[in-house]
Amino acid sequence: METIGFLELNSIAQGIQAADTMLKAAEVNLVFARTACPGKYHVMLSGDVAAVQAAIEAGQSAGGACVVDSVVIPRVHPQVIQAINQATEPGEVNAVGVLEFFSVTAAVQAADVAVKAADVELVDLRLGLGIGGKSFVVLTGEVAAVREAIHAGAGIASDSGMLMGNVVIPSPRPEVFQSLY
């Protein structure tokens, strides 16, 4: 598994500069660098732990007061990358869990924690595009596993104030579940 780093800024100009600085600071791969609502800029990198850490630190320095949040996740769960790319097709749905955040960074970190905590399938990791800068995580599995994953994911962001809400819905109606992805 790879390490990912994520940097969230509230300035597009500073975000672009931070992305360039990050790529010059260490041998990392740019997963994406893009704008998001409401006028934020997100940079995701991958590579080995030390390189990603060095790049994130350089980006934080370049971004200065415009940095909203950042995270480095060693050995990121493969489902996190699939969900970011919206490449997951859900199987049978016994329960659905949703975590909602004010920060995209918190959603990425919580998704990784949630899928490592229980036997669940990460269906979507929506990164603040077209939803006012908020983000959300959707996962499925057996009811008990979904509850455990939601509890773990919510715990990672509740102390920072970035958790907006969370729900676990046993036996969701198919129409509701299909509207989520």
Image (cartoon, rainbow, N blue to C red):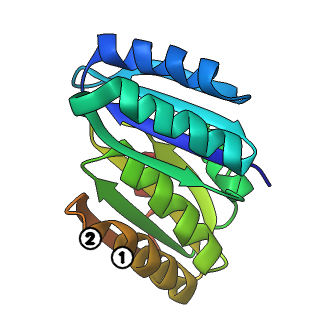
- Could you tell me the amino acid type at mark 1? Gly
| Residue 88 seen in render | no
- Whether residue 131 sits left or right of residue 48 in the image: it is left
- Whether residue 157 sits left or right of residue 55 in the image: it is left
Separation (CA) of disc 1 from disc 2: 5 Å
- Could you tell me the amino acid type at mark 2? Ser
Label 1: which secondary element = helix
Name the residue beneath numbered marker 2: 158
Q: Position of residue 139 (x, y in %)?
A: 53, 63
| Residue 29, quarter of the rendered image | top right
Name the residue beneath numbered marker 1: 155
Kindly check if marks 1 and 2 are in contact, taking CB atoms under 8 A apart as contact. yes
Q: Is residue 75 above or below residue 169?
A: above
Q: Is residue 34 above or below residue 6?
A: above
Name the residue: 26% across, 70% down.
158
- Whether residue 173 sits left or right of residue 49 in the image: it is left
Q: Position of residue 75 (x, y in %)?
A: 72, 59
Name the residue: 36% across, 72% down.
154
For the residue carrying disc 1, how many other residues have a C-alpha within 10 Å: few (<14), some (14-19), or many (20+)?
some
Label 2: which secondary element = helix
Q: Nearer the viewer, residue 35 or 20?
A: 20
| Residue 96 seen in render | yes
- Of the 4 image quadrants, the one containing the N terminus is bottom right
Q: Nearer the viewer, residue 176 or 115?
A: 115
Name the residue: 24% across, 49% down.
102
Give the farthest residue toward the bottom.
144
Name the residue: 41% across, 53% down.
107
Q: Nearer the viewer, residue 21 or 116?
A: 21
Q: Position of residue 160 (x, y in %)?
A: 24, 64
Q: Is residue 65 above or below residue 102?
A: above
